Amino acid sequence: MTKTDLQLLEACPEAMILVQGKKPVAWNSQACRMLDWSSKKPGVKNFWDTQEGLWSLAGDEVGLFQSKHERVLQGRAAKMRCVARRLTGSMFDAEWKAVPMEDGRIMVQIRDISERTVYEQVIRDSEQRFRSLARHAMEGIAFLDGTEIVDANEQFAILFGWKELPVGQDIMDLVNTRDWQRLGARKFARSRVELQGTTQQGAIIHLEATKSTDTTTNQTVLMVYDITERKRTELDLLQTKERFRMLVETSPIGLLLMVDGKVKYSNPGVLDLMGLRLEDEVYDEEFVSLFHEDDQAVLQEDIRRVQEGERPPYREVRMKSGTDDMVEVGIRMTLSFHDRSAAVQVTLSDLRTRVALVREQMRATLAEEANHLLKEEIKRHKATQKLLADTERLNRSIIESSIDMIVAFEPDGSLAQYNHAFAVEFGLDMGEDPSTYTFLDFVSTKTEAERVRGSLLEDRNFSGETVGRRRNGEVFPMHLTVALLQNEEEGTFGAMAVGRDITEAKLSREVLEASEARYRAILEGANDAIFTLDDQGFFTYTNPSFNELLGYSEVELSKRTVHDVVQGLPSRGKKWMKALEGSREERKFIAANGETLTMLGGASIQHNEQGKPTNVRGIFLDITDMRLHEARARTQSAKLESIFDSTENMIMFTMDGADHVNAFNKNFKEIFEYDFGLTFDSGRSFIEDISRVVDEEPYQGQLRLFLRAMEGKPQQFELPLKTIHGDSRWYQVFLNPVSLGDDQREISCIAYDITERKEIDRAIRSALKEKEVLLQEVHHRVKNNLQVISSMLNLQKSFVKDPETLNLLEESTNRIATMSFIHESLYRNTDFANISFAEYLQRLSANLIQSYSRSDCEVVLQTVFDEVYLSLEQAIPCGLITNELVSNALKYAFPDQSQGVITLRIQHTEGGGVELEVSDEGVGLPKGMDFSKNDSLGVYLVQALTEQIDGELVVTSTDQGRKGCSFLVRFTPST
């Protein structure tokens, strides 16, 4: 080698060895340091020796090494990873690359990759931990490239109803576009936004989402949590609140609230009883002062009993009215609340008619509530049983499909038993006698077997990477864990080993690093509170959501244990670990400010190789607000049930699929028994019974709608019934299906008496008909009067000789005729708001052609009409505009021509507007004429009428590149 070559060789940071044939002939100082060689003498005689030389090869590596060597001898470069041996006998992981030179020698570069191998193993372990966290998270997680889903966890697929991960799908197909835009517009990456999504089955779901960016891959990390049930609960709460308010405000029964003996609220029913107009007239008045002096003492005593939690009896007392008369009322008091303070609710009923007496329905109400709670408990129990069954099937499937090799050995090293995965991996049959094989038959070399045996003798266990050998001689890397089996006397009676082929588990460093960054982003950005505890209960890790929800800093948590944060855990020993372990359980967490939060989630216990618990990992979700909403909904439901039973004119009942009434309120029983003579015993058909009291004359088969409602379609209709007294009554009926599961269906029915409203409607329709006839007569008379004026002008023309005056009279006559046609169209139609303008223009243009026809010029009128309907306010101005433009064209467009064409067009435009155009093929406008400054009456009328309808006038003529003249009016029809 030249001096320059030697300098280059020495400057290389890697070990460089020049090999001629089998013998190293030159090497740099880095090779001396890495291999413990001297600068004068190489450490090996045969560089390519696979037994005792530089390389320590496993059984499966020898063939690969030899093929690489052959490749180099053929003049091609080669590269390989294997274990290298220093001159001192120590080993290290190396990567060598050989390049043939022109003179037949080979330049070999050797790199120590021991640290990189350890780093890759750490990365793989980290990835496994993050994958476990993502798999057990309650949130759905997806990674997006633009809007394409490139990865997701199982929970994400479950949320959207996918059996497999929706990789490759567009996120815009799964979520609402506007919600996605709102999420993208948030400045802070961890801001939460509610999204509306659609499952693969088409169902609508509501989600709470956060979005962040993975700076390593530049991908978007989307995390979603299903809040569909919470949204439904909020909607039910709002609807219940609104129904409660409407029922109270429209109830004919008086209802008031008092605090400390003073009236704080009274509904219109109370004001009607007292003959008052404004609530202020009783506000803040002493409650007992509203009643007769003889009743005030007993009422004061009832107030005291209510405040102490008792329920006083129903009473009949005398109440003062605005006219100083006494009104007999029925009164009942119950404990309630007002402005978050304890209050007494008072219900008043007018006893003068004895119709609205409240009957006690407490037993029925309690039974219905108990039935409702029982149904909910059964549903929850079934869901729990299904979840347990699914979990059991999942665990069984995991065990049956395990890819780990499990094998037991006798003390002498022969096989005692092995699983299916072991048989498949090593090429054995499940029926073979295992005692014919020993541990040495399944490792690559005797050296590897001695290494494992030595670890067992010294530490009683072995865990690490080794090289296995299949029955056909093929070798492969595997991870092996071996433990000795001992009896109570500490005697060894065998060993148990678990192994796995790790050939495909070696991924490149770049992929592993990206994966670690990705799952770290998941952990740090999750909405769930995630934490890790050591075996003493101290917090070793908390994610940002945990700190944000509970308000603890890292310094504060370092001084606290799990007992300081989670309520109800056993304090003795490590029993708290078992208590906290589980997949789905509610727990009470104490925040830094002392507030108690309800959290839903679970924890898992981590064990070391000896099976001892080392730490606990937990994932919990804050459900405090959700539980608060549920409690409020139950309270509102109970109040609503009480009010429904005390509402006077509302009929409520439910009916099962067999046409039997199974629940009803008191009004149902009273009205159908007293007014219609019907009793609905169990087992009787409701439709058959109700059909006997249907008023046949107006009846149109509405009862069949009960069957349609039972099919799951809500119905609303009016039903005429005839009472036992022969009176006809109308009811507004609302039917809604109620799903109870297990293919059982019910319908809920609500009906209101609308007899008085029907009578009012009939009177209104009669009055409206009379007004239509009167309005037609008015338009008929206006038309006749306009024709009289037109006739008088025609008569006047016979006495006038001046041509200019005759022309003015002629134009006035045509303008009056134009308005007359409009009124004629109105009294011939019943719809006064919409006039068929195309039909009107047809008659108007024909009249104008006849009026202005000339013997020396034949004018042809071409029309293009859409079906355009205008109001009277727009039809008259448009008719006058058309009159002016068509008459001007007939008079001035064809002065020296024997024939001409005039086009009249009215059409709709794309924006909902209308275009009215009069054009001709005549001489056009005079040169230099400014249409906007012309003082002609006709021009003034066209401009003024165009402004009147908020339109736009466009005039084009011959000097603008067209033949003739065009007048185009654009406007928007009034509604």
Image (cartoon, helix red, strand yellow):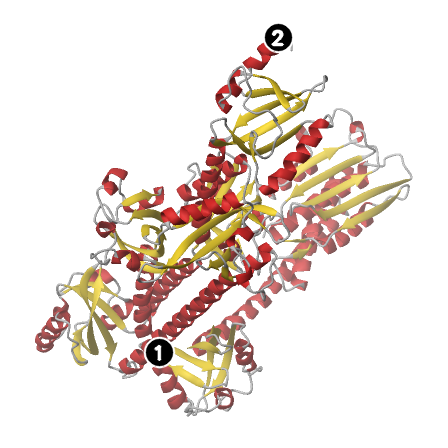
Mark identifier at residue 4:
2
Q: Which one is in front, 930 or 865?
A: 865
Task: Tell me the CA gap for discs 2 and 1.
Answer: 98 Å
Give the residue drawn at x 51%, y 24%. Answer: 35
Disc 2 residue type? Thr
Q: Position of residue 494 (x, y in %)?
A: 42, 59
- As drawn, is 350 to the left or to the right of 768? left
Q: Which one is in front, 232 or 808?
A: 232
- As drawn, is 169 to the left or to the right of 291? right
Per the image, the residue denoted by label 1 is 371
Mark identifier at residue 916:
none
- Foreground tag (2 vs 1): 2
Q: Position of residue 511 (x, y in %)?
A: 54, 38
Give the residue drawn at x 34%, y 74%. Answer: 373
Give the residue drawn at x 54%, y 60%. Answer: 401
Residue count near mark 2 (Cα–Cα under 10 Å), binned few <14, some 14–19, many ≥20 = few
Residue count near mark 1 (Cα–Cα under 10 Å), binned few <14, some 14–19, many ≥20 = few
Disc 1 residue type? Asn
Q: Which one is in front, 467 or 339?
A: 467
Residue 959 seen in the figure: yes
Q: Position of residue 242 (x, y in %)?
A: 36, 63
- As drawn, is 299 to the left or to the right of 145? left
Indicate the secondary structure of the residue bearing disc 1.
helix
Give the residue drawn at x 46%, y 63%. Answer: 395
- As drawn, is 157 to the left or to the right of 629? right
